Image: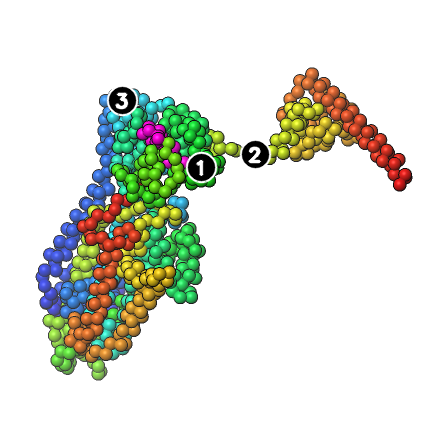
């Protein structure tokens, strides 16, 4: 005896329809498909606007996905030993089929991810999206804290990957980076020793960074990512969708106008009548399939296409093999830490024989303070619930201005550190040539 | 009645998605193309054509296709030069242009390509398979191919290809003279003639006024002060200029100006640059000592043994295991019994005379005398005679010792 075609809970299509003919078919796709199950059946339309979220979170996730995918072949082609790491990267670069491209995809995705995750954080701050609206049980502030943790994980993932090629760039960037970290009072040097497995960057460092880079950090970031997504659902979608409740109250749904996909509504009374704005104001919501999925496809596939094309034209650098005896001039940290290095060098003051080391201010106090403030800001922000999910809400003028100023300073210092600092950390305009670097022969 | 809510969403999404799809196709084509466009594909095609012209299509089929490398395991070098330079070991392309030219066979006799690879001698980047990256100069690869054109860039005196001799001397650094390395030989003579070791340590010997030059070739370019150097900013150019006039580059130096000409200073700069800690196994370096040297006392003692009364036992090799105490022969190992007592020993241990035992030995001596120390019957007779002589000497010494002790004991009661 076969089940009737319309039996509840039976979803005959394993794949969703690109052109659902009814709301039911569109909803079924979400319920029956594993990949789509984390989406709601209907989405508040303004949440999908390009110019609200700029889809930066989705881009970050797409880049993370690309990084895992491009990291898999590198995982087995790369040899994490100080004698062979450099050679294995040269092999990937020169003779592995598509090796240059795979490595470039991995590198460009990593750099972009640092930038995009940061921009995502800026967007969430400026829209007040870490604020709880009017929904019950919202914990958006914790999702924000998780987001800050994910930014730090992204930075650390990129930083651990930076060392792996074992060239001069890698070696000295990590030297500078870990030296900044060792300025933490009391535990700093011990912390550095634990991180790099000794006092100099050697095999112990390489294998620690490798293990962190390929197992611990991606797993941690993946777990946080999943939880981040889940919390968005639990918090009622993007902060902007809280605006929905400010619309005129919904009318009682007359009996008889029932819906069968009861998972998605709240049943009151004896009969499963549904009150949902998606029925009362259909122009404000869209089906996830296919309006949301199409946009996600645009963003994810677009990210992949852009990274792929960039990877053909932007070569990944690989300098001389790491040499502990020769410090390149200038020795720079990875670009996303250069604003810190800039502050460290600017605040290192020498008065006669007395030296105030800037590493403590620029490397510990300042970033510590900023990260601490970012983490607790949702609890310090006293603006009304209506400010959640609105760009530059009038009640948050001051904090937005201060935040933007800080962002501007960080970006400015990063640009100066990356493009305008030459040998001896002297200032050079981008059009000024650096002194010629000597070579062997 | 089930129906589809009209999507209020902009219709533009669909064409955007289509455009992205197109972009993906473009990106796939692009990266596939970027992987295909290497020069070596053309060079291999061209070489095959040349082989076909010269030796026929059948021979051309044996030309390998694709990436290839020479793995010189001892030197830990993977040289992919042969991907383009396919003619290296072929005959008949001696006059073709690069990369279709046969390698001159002479240097390869002593330096087989499977053991040395290419870059150990020629320089360049063995990892790379593109001409510019393999030959250099390229950013971040400080070992360009030491070719004639690089020599021309330095306006080398006479032989423009002499720069390669720097790499010869990485292994041949302990040679007084190396065949084919005229510039290096010239420089080594200058080192002796001008007495560089008066101030500099070279290979562990020399004065300490100047810096140790034993591994100065490894000094990084960043570590030279090039502010007073005009022209090319390279370590090699620095050395050439410095040798010509040390004070011009380092005003406070005490190094005298030897008035070296261009040719001499270039040769010396090559020699100095060749003094590197290159990871070369000891057997690649002629002249590297492979024994732990004896102490002067040991040398004197061995000389004594070789010229003393027991010289025969030393020359024949008995002393490797046996001491001959009565003749002053001392074995380092002392595995066997003292041969001074052999005449007695064979009697007490085997119940045989020393003649009988030596002619028909048993045990270890049977093996030694049949495999390692092979003596003719006449030599054996000499051996027996020597053994008897040692015993006689032993008895003599014992007797004189006994009389000496009895003399002292006779003197004792007088106290």
* Badge 3 and badge 2 both on one subunit: yes
Instruction: Identify the colour scheme used.
Output: rainbow
Q: Which mark is residue A78?
A: none
Residue at mark 1 to residue at mark 2: CA–CA distance: 26 Å
Establish if B83 lies above or below B220.
Answer: above
Residue bearing the label numbered 3 = B95
- In the rendered image, is residue A337 in sight? no
Instruction: Tell me the crowding category of disc 3: few under 14, some 14 to 19, or many 20 or more residues within 10 angstroms, Cα based.
Output: few
Q: Which mark is residue B199?
A: 1
- Which residue occupies 33% across, 65% down? A361
Give the magenta-colored segment's residue range.
Answer: B259-278
* Badge 1 and badge 2 both on one subunit: yes
Is the C-beta separation of discs 1 and 2 under 8 Å? no
Specify the subunit that label 3 lies on: B
The answer to which of B75 and B29 lies nearer the viewer is B75
Mark nearest the camera among 3 and 1 is: 1
Q: Position of residue A185 (x, y in %)?
A: 40, 66
- Which residue occupies 12% across, 76% down? A280
Q: Position of residue B112 (x, y in %)?
A: 40, 28
Residue bearing the label numbered 2 = B293
Query: Is A212 displayed left or right of A242 in the figure?
Result: right
User: For residue B410, which quarter of the picture?
Assistant: top right
- Work out whether mark 3 precedes mark 1 in sequence or the reverse, and give the earlier one: 3
> Image quadrant for the C terminus of chain B?
top right
Specify the subunit that label 1 lies on: B
Q: Secondary structure at mark 1?
A: loop
- Work out whether mark 3 precedes mark 2 in sequence or the reverse, and give the earlier one: 3
Q: Position of residue B82 (x, y in %)?
A: 31, 32
């Amino acid at each position: 005896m076969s089940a009737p075609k319309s039996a509840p809970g039976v979803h005959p299509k394993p794949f969703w329809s690109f052109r659902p003919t009814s709301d039911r078919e569109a909803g079924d796709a979400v319920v029956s498909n594993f990949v789509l199950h984390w989406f709601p059946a209907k989405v508040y339309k303004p949440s999908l606007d390009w110019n609200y979220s700029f889809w930066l979170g989705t881009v970050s996730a797409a880049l993370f996905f690309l990084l895992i995918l491009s990291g898999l072949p590198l995982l087995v082609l790369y040899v994490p030993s100080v004698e062979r790491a450099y050679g294995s990267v040269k092999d990937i670069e020169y003779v592995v089929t598509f090796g240059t491209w795979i490595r470039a995809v991995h590198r460009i995705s990593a750099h972009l991810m640092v930038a995009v995750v940061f921009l995502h954080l800026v967007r969430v701050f400026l829209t007040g999206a870490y604020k709880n609206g009017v929904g019950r049980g919202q914990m958006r502030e914790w999702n924000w804290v998780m987001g800050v943790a994910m930014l730090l994980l992204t930075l650390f993932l990129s930083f651990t990957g930076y060392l792996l090629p074992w060239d001069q760039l890698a070696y000295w960037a990590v030297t500078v980076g870990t030296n900044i970290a060792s300025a933490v009072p009391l535990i700093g040097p011990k912390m550095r020793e634990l991180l790099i497995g000794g006092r100099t960057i050697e095999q112990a460092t390489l294998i620690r960074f490798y293990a962190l880079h390929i197992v611990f950090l991606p797993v941690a970031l993946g777990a946080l990512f999943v939880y981040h997504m889940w919390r968005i659902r639990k918090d009622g979608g993007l902060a902007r969708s809280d605006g929905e409740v400010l619309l005129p109250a919904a009318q009682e749904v007359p009996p008889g106008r029932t819906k069968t996909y009861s998972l998605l509504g709240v049943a009151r009374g004896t009969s499963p009548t549904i009150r949902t704005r998606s029925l009362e104001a259909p122009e404000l919501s869209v089906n996830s399939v296919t309006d949301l999925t199409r946009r996600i496809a645009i963003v994810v596939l677009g990210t992949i296409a852009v990274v792929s094309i960039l990877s053909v034209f932007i070569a990944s650098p690989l300098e001389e093999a790491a040499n502990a005896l020769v410090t390149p001039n200038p020795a720079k940290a990875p670009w996303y830490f250069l604003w810190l290095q800039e502050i460290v060098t600017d605040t290192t003051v020498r008065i006669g024989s007395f030296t105030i080391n800037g590493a403590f201010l620029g490397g510990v106090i300042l970033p510590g303070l900023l990260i601490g403030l970012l983490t607790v800001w949702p609890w310090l922000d006293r603006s009304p619930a209506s400010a959640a999910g609105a760009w530059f809400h009038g009640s948050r003028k001051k904090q937005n201005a201060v935040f933007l100023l800080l962002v501007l300073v960080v970006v400015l210092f990063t640009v100066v550190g990356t493009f305008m600092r030459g040998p001896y950390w002297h200032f050079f305009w981008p059009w000024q040539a650096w002194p010629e670097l000597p070579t062997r022969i | 009645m089930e129906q589809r809510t009209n999507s209020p969403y902009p219709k533009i999404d669909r064409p955007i998605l289509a455009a992205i799809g197109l972009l993906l196709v473009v990106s796939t084509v692009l990266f596939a193309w970027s992987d295909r466009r290497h020069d070596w594909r053309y060079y291999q095609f061209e070489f095959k054509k040349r082989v076909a012209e010269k030796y026929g299509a059948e021979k051309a089929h044996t030309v390998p296709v694709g990436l290839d490398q020479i793995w010189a395991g001892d030197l830990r070098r993977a040289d992919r030069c042969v991907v383009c330079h396919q003619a290296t070991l072929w005959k008949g392309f001696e006059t073709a242009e690069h990369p279709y030219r046969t390698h001159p066979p002479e240097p390869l006799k002593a330096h087989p390509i499977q053991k040395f690879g290419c870059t150990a001698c020629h320089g360049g980047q063995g990892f790379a398979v593109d001409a510019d990256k393999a030959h250099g100069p390229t950013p971040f690869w400080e070992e360009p191919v030491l070719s004639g054109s690089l020599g021309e860039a330095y306006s080398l005196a006479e032989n423009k290809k002499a720069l390669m001799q720097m790499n010869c001397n990485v292994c041949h650094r302990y040679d007084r003279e190396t065949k084919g390395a005229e510039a290096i030989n010239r420089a080594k003579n200058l080192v002796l003639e001008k007495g560089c070791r008066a101030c500099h340590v070279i290979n562990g010997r020399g004065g300490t006024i100047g810096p140790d030059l034993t591994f100065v070739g490894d000094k990084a370019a960043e570590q030279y002060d090039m502010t007073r150097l005009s022209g090319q900013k390279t370590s090699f150019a620095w050395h050439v200029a410095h040798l010509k006039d040390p004070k011009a580059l380092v005003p406070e130096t005490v190094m005298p100006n030897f008035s070296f000409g261009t040719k001499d200073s270039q040769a010396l700069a090559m020699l100095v640059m060749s003094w590197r800690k290159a990871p070369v196994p000891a057997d690649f370096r002629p002249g590297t000592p492979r024994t732990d040297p004896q102490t002067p006392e040991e040398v004197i003692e061995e000389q004594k043994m070789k010229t003393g009364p027991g010289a025969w036992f030393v020359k024949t090799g008995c002393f490797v295991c046996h001491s001959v105490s009565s003749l002053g022969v001392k074995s380092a190992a002392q595995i066997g019994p003292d041969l001074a007592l052999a005449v007695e020993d064979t009697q007490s241990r085997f119940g045989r005379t020393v003649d009988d035992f030596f002619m028909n030995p048993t045990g270890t001596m049977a093996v030694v005398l049949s495999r390692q120390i092979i003596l003719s019957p006449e030599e054996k007779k000499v051996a027996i005679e020597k053994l008897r002589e040692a015993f006689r000497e032993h008895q003599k010494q014992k007797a004189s010792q006994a009389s000496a002790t009895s003399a002292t004991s006779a003197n004792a009661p007088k106290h």
